[in-house]
Image (tube, coloured by chain):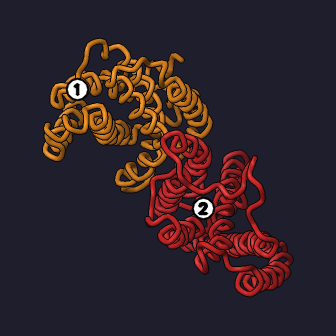
Chain colours: A red, B orange
Amino acid sequence: MRRAFALVYGPLLGVTAVVTGAALALIFLVAPEERVMGAVQKLFYIHVPLAFVTFLAVFVLLVGALGYLGTRRPVWDRLARATSEVGWLFCTLVLVTGPIWARPAWGVWWTWEAKLTTTLVLWLLLAGILLARGYATTPEQGARVGAVLGVIAALDVPIIYKAVDWWRGQHPIVFGPGKSDPLAPGMRAAFLVAMLAVTLVFALLVVLRMRLAALEDAIVAAEDAAWRSSS
Amino acid sequence: MRAASAIAAKDLRIEGRTLRTAAATGLFALVVLVVFAFAFDLDTVRRLGAPRVVPGVIWITLAFSALVGFTRSYELERQRDAIAALAIAPIDRGAVFAGKCAANLAMLLTLAAVLLPLTLVFFDAGREGAALPLVAVTVLHTVGLAELGTLFGAVASRLARGEALLAVLLLPAATPLFLSAVQCTRGVLEGAPLSDNARWMLVTAGCDVLYFLVALLVFESVLEEG
């Protein structure tokens, strides 16, 4: 585990730093200013990748949770733990950046539209997982509870999205079948690089969090051993 | 199957003799209903149209009272650590889940049988021929609620002081059920045929099956000691 971390962390940090720098330069120096919305449209380059990565995190959480329930190997739990925490952080950022853009663009801070509602419910689900893990008395119990709740949350998200979508809709669909590409070339480059940058930041945080989780587990194990040998 | 029905029968027999859960959840439901009656007085409800307000009142009341019931359901097992006995019993963990779930479903349906007529009377929302479709809608949605409640109730009961968590875990996860339940109930109260909401009913039936299968798979991990 430690060797894998040492192998991955350095290069990942370097690549992330370069790509993030490039993304910021493209967003603020190269991409043209949008005619109607103006500077606030720059948020699009951050907000959309954040949202994408939040849902990617839920998918990885499902993989980690199923892996842990199937094999009971701690590394899967560390993956689930890391993705639920980092995913919650990204989800929070989506919910913060969204309204800042929505206020000038739509005239309201918030609407109960499918993507917004689903993201909010997802935020609650992830917060519930973190809270439940905090209530656990042993690491194994926390891992099991986190995995069970993670599976339910991940399976629920698409259903919630579809249900709220039938209920009502308003979110702009920028990409989708039957839509001509709305982005000017400079915008598209900035968007794609920003997408890569945010994904890399996510990967970096997950790797760091998994390493931290491994250290946490080692401390608990060492404490247990010390307690057992002293009594 | 036999183990599941034995567990359900045990829970229901205890409940039949003590009526503790029924008293707690029933009274709680009544209190919530009265609070709603203060919040939305009859004039407001009539102006908006009962079908727009009453489904929400019904399902919020049912969900909140169900939370009280789900917590109680595992308190039975916590006394003298009966849950450990259940966990080591030589039966499938799925059977334990199915049994607890059936007992919880019976509790919810009994509650709904009292709550629904009462709400319709309080808010003047009843209409001819609504009874049967309303029963169908209620049964379909309480099944999913009972499944999630049984699973999350078990999770919460395993955690120290976990009862406080149950609402936080259960209500967001049950979002699709609530959306569908309110939609279908509104349709019935407006006098639309059930087939108008066939899409919602189908999704809910799908959720009922999905939650049951997932719960069967993960319930063993929930019951585990330590």
Q: Which residue is mark 2?
A: A84
The relative height of residue A75 versus residue B42 in the rendered view (above or below) is below
Query: Are labels 2 and 1 on one chain?
Result: no
Q: Is residue B126 visible?
A: yes
Q: Nearer the viewer, residue B135 or B7?
A: B135
- Chain for disc number 1: B
Residue A97's disc is: none
Q: Residue at x 39, y 54 (%)?
A: B165
Give amino acid for label 2.
Ser
The image quarter in which residue B154 lies? top left
The image quarter in which residue B58 lies? top left
The relative height of residue B214 versus residue A67 in the rendered view (above or below) is above
The relative height of residue B171 versus residue B216 in the rendered view (above or below) is below
Q: Nearer the viewer, residue B216 or B147?
A: B147
Position of residue B52 measured from the top left corner of the image (x, y, whole percent): 31, 36
Position of residue A195 measured from the top left corner of the image (x, y, whole percent): 75, 69
Position of residue A85 measured from the top left corner of the image (x, y, whole percent): 59, 66
The relative height of residue A80 versus residue B212 in the rendered view (above or below) is below
Q: Distance from label 2 to label 1 (Cα)?
A: 44 Å
Q: Nearer the viewer, residue B142 or A138?
A: B142
Q: Which residue is mark 1?
A: B125
Q: Residue at x 75, y 66 (%)?
A: A183
Position of residue A45 measured from the top left corner of the image (x, y, whole percent): 68, 72
Q: Nearer the viewer, residue A78 or B44?
A: B44
Give amino acid for label 1.
Ala
Q: Residue at x 27, y 34 (%)?
A: B54
